[in-house]
Amino acid sequence: MIGSLGLGALWLVLTVSGSDDAWSGFRGPDGSCVSRIETMVESYAAENVAWKIGVGAGYSSPILSERAVFLTAFEGLNPATFCFDRKTGKELWKTPAPKPLEEAYRGMNTPVSSTPATDGKRVYSYYMHFGLVCHDAESGDVVWQHEVDMLRVPHGMSSSPILAGGKVLLQCDQDTGSYLLALDKDTGKPAWKIDRPGITHGYSTPIVHQPKEGPVEVILSGAYQLTGHSLETGERLWWVDGMCWMPMAMPSIADGVVYVSSAMSSPAEFGAPSFDGTFKEALAEKDQDGDEKISKSEWPHKGLAELWFIYDLNGDDLFDEEDWNFAQARKRALGGTFAVKLGGKGDVTGSHILWKYDDRRGQSGSPSPLVYEGAVYLIKDGGVLTTLDAKTGDVLKQGRVGQPSPYSASPIGACGKVLLASGAGQVVLLDAGKEWEELGAWELDGDIWATPAVGNGQTFVRTKNWLYAFQATSGGH
């Protein structure tokens, strides 16, 4: 068995098939947001709160080991990683980032929007202003640290580190110079770094897939393209074109198919100009000083001025031909929700897309798709939930859940139920199935932007200022 899989693949299999209670990274086991727990909290009323503790700001999700809860947070200019006891909420340790922020962060994300990962012995945190830090899970002591240059991502970095095959993986998509990084998880030394030419900024996190045959794959949802890479070397193995210009959601995998929500409105809907014609034609009309670039003063367009940070790829405050070409690509790259059959090589755009759902009324944005019991769950801002048949892409049901609200947290499937958490601070529980049904909705204290974590008989929800631990009653499912 070891000879056919290889030691790296064996490590992955052992990690994936470990404790059913291991919500050890972003979106839990395998990054799927599907848990194999036997008991789930079914009421989020006050009487089911085991404990509640104040935490600093941040959008990162809580993760779990057998006895602890980990998350990152910041107060003022000071980000840190925290460890709490799962049963009592007692703070076990707090370790500050290697250095504070130089100034207050003003992006739509936070300095700690990336969710940590743990293997039970160590905890791996990413700070957008510093890089990756490995902590001892028991003491919080720093085992190693690896600096990563500040990425040029307009709204701030939110991709989370993941663990696979003895490596820590980080998707570093930015406006210029995107790459995928792999470090040795024990030493922090680089294993490999693969450039991603043509990929601009995005906010997705990789997912790992072990085919029946062949190398373990790292699958990335990036601007314009979905790609599969060798976990061992980083080599790009296959790709699918047609993705949107600013992906946010993490892919999901089920039964040899990868499901990816890669949909984005055209920048024109935000007030941007149409960018018609060629760049030479634009220069002839607007380039007053003859430097073969366009400045803000040469193109006094209100919508463009407000969105300049999206189009100015290298940050030089000038619009050049590369910026123009990407601007034109963005108005076409609206994407959709895709089901892609795994197992291909090279360009599989024309051969492996099983279906595409592109109705704008049902597309999710930040929340990743949940594939659970034969259905794909998509939650959209406003609280509109759409379920698709996982095999055909046909709409099974569409309707509003809870109160109207923005959504960032991903849906969770467990024990025949689906758990949702809204930006308005509401937790919603559904009975899963083709004719899903809302079972209850509960208001918590503060907005919810982080995906909850579930363990046997427990659910951990991070709001703007609090970390809640809910405990199932004896009558829980």
Image (tube, grey):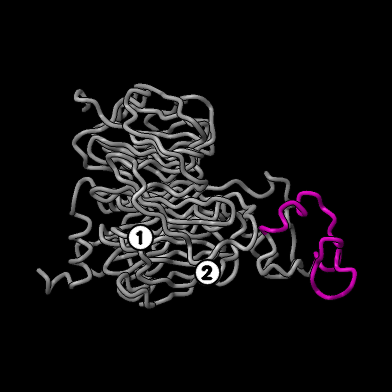
Quadrant of the drawing holding the C terminus: top left
**In the rendered image of this protein, does residue 377 appear above or below residue 249?**
above
Indicate the quadrant containing the N terminus: top left, top right, bottom left or bottom right: bottom left
Question: The disc labelled 1 sits on which kind of residue?
Answer: Gly
Residue that mark 1 sits on: 140
- Amino acid type at mark 2: Ser
Q: For residue 304: magenta?
A: yes
Residue where numbered disc 2 is placed: 178
Q: Which region is colored magenta?
A: 281-310
- Residue at coordinates 28% horizontally, 58% vertically from top-left? 138
Disc 2 vs disc 1: which is toward the camera? Answer: 1
Q: Residue 150: within the magenta?
A: no
Q: Front-most of 428 and 247?
A: 428
Query: Residue drawn at (33%, 75%), measured in percent from left and top?
Result: 187
Pointer 1 local density, CA inside 10 Å: few below 14, some 14–19, many at least 20 = some
**Circles 2 and 1: CB atoms closer than 8 Å:** no
Count of numbered badges drawn on the protein: 2
Spatial CA span between label 2 and label 1 = 31 Å
| Nearest the eye: 440 or 311 | 440
Percent coordinates x, y for residue 29 in the rendering: 28, 50
Furthest residue in direction left, as rendered: 1
Q: Secondary structure at mark 1?
A: loop
Q: Nearer the viewer, residue 127 or 98?
A: 98
At x 37%, y 31%, the residue is 396
